[in-house]
Image: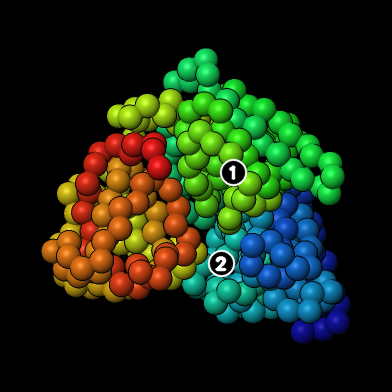
């Protein structure tokens, strides 16, 4: 190929890439480490080699704000590649081996943002007049607080996302989560004062009222369903269970394999032995990105124990 031909080839390819970028007008942000930590870079065009963008290594988590993107494990769009739609990717699909070296936009998606995995539906209960929670942030001798008398699916809208380090619940049962819309890692709190929030300390992004706190009061639930994942963080092979349950996960080749799980509806009992024996725990709707040691890679049977989740602790 002559120099002139190579230049024309580059000129046409560059023009097409520029036209595609202008037409798609998407945006993606890449982070050096999982959970959006470390060095980051944002682009509305192709990055054929992340190492040329100042990255010390490859990207391990992503936020896609607009557009549909192709992400590949090797530079210049080689290696294993996956398609990423709008959403937040705290960890990467197993296909990417937890790394991205090149990205390019392949289409435009004007629909609402969505994550790489389905988020469980959250049904909010009717709110009585006494529903009330106070979220507080301590900064030395100063304390900043906000009061909610109704659900707020995005605390960033009132400038209090990722701030609360203590709470006081005056009325009702509330679900607090580290993702918008009542998703992510969640915990439920009945009336009382909580000076420590554990994994939610400084990470709360949504607060939903789910029950008035009376015995027997419950929020309507989604259809009973649980999804088991092979590795923590909802990664690896998965198995969905609907209806009554599975007395022996060996038949599904999933005994002692679950490292995380997502409950989309109902309360479920998980046991370390077949036929619902051994050590058992009952969990309600939510995302369990990492299982406790008594269940981690030990679940051998699972069954539905209630179609609704009673919002009491």
Quarter where residue 74 is shown: bottom right
Residue at image x 62%, y 58%? 69
Residue at image x 25%, y 39%? 307
Of residues 33 and 170, the one nearer the viewer is 170
Residue 241 to residue 253: above or below: above
Of residues 101 and 256, the one nearer the viewer is 256
> Residue 194 shows which numbered tag?
1
Q: Quadrant of the C terminus?
A: top left
- Left or right: 235 as drawn, with respect to 178: left
Let me know if residue 75 appears in the view. yes
Q: Secondary structure at mark 1?
A: strand
Residue at image x 44%, y 20%? 126
* Residue bearing mark 2: 92
Question: Are there few (<14), some (14-19), or many (20+) residues within 10 Å of tag 2?
Answer: many
Between the C-alphas of marks 1 and 2, the distance is 34 Å
Percent across and percent down for residue 151 are 56, 28
Residue at image x 17%, y 49%? 244
């Amino acid at each position: 190929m002559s120099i002139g031909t190579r230049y024309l080839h580059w000129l046409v390819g560059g023009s097409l890439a520029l036209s595609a970028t202008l037409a798609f007008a998407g945006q993606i942000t890449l982070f050096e480490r999982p959970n959006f930590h470390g060095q980051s870079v944002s682009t509305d065009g192709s990055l054929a080699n992340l190492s040329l963008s100042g990255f010390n290594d490859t990207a391990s988590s992503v936020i896609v704000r607009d557009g549909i993107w192709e992400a590949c494990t090797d530079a210049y769009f080689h290696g294993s590649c996956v398609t990423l739609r709008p959403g937040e990717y705290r960890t990467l699909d197993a296909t990417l081996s937890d790394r991205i070296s090149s990205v390019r936009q392949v289409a435009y998606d004007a629909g609402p943002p969505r994550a790489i995995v389905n988020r469980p539906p959250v049904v909010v209960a009717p709110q009585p007049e006494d529903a009330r929670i106070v979220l507080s942030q301590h900064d030395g001798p100063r304390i900043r607080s906000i009061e909610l008398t109704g659900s707020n699916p995005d605390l960033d809208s009132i400038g209090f996302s990722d701030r609360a380090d203590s709470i006081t619940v005056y009325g009702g049962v509330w679900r607090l989560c580290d993702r918008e819309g009542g998703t992510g890692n969640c915990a439920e709190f009945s009336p009382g004062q909580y000076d420590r929030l554990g994994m939610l300390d400084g990470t709360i992004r949504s607060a939903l009222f789910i029950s008035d706190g009376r015995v027997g009061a419950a929020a309507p639930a989604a259809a009973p369903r649980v999804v088991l994942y092979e590795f923590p963080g909802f990664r690896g092979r998965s198995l969905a269970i609907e209806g009554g349950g599975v007395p022996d996960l060996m038949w599904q080749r999933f005994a002692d394999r679950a490292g995380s799980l997502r409950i989309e509806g109902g309360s479920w009992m998980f046991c370390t032995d077949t036929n619902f024996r051994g050590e058992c725990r009952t969990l309600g709707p939510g995302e369990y990105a990492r299982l406790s040691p008594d269940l981690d890679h030990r679940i051998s049977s699972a069954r539905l124990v209630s179609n609704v989740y009673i919002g009491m602790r």
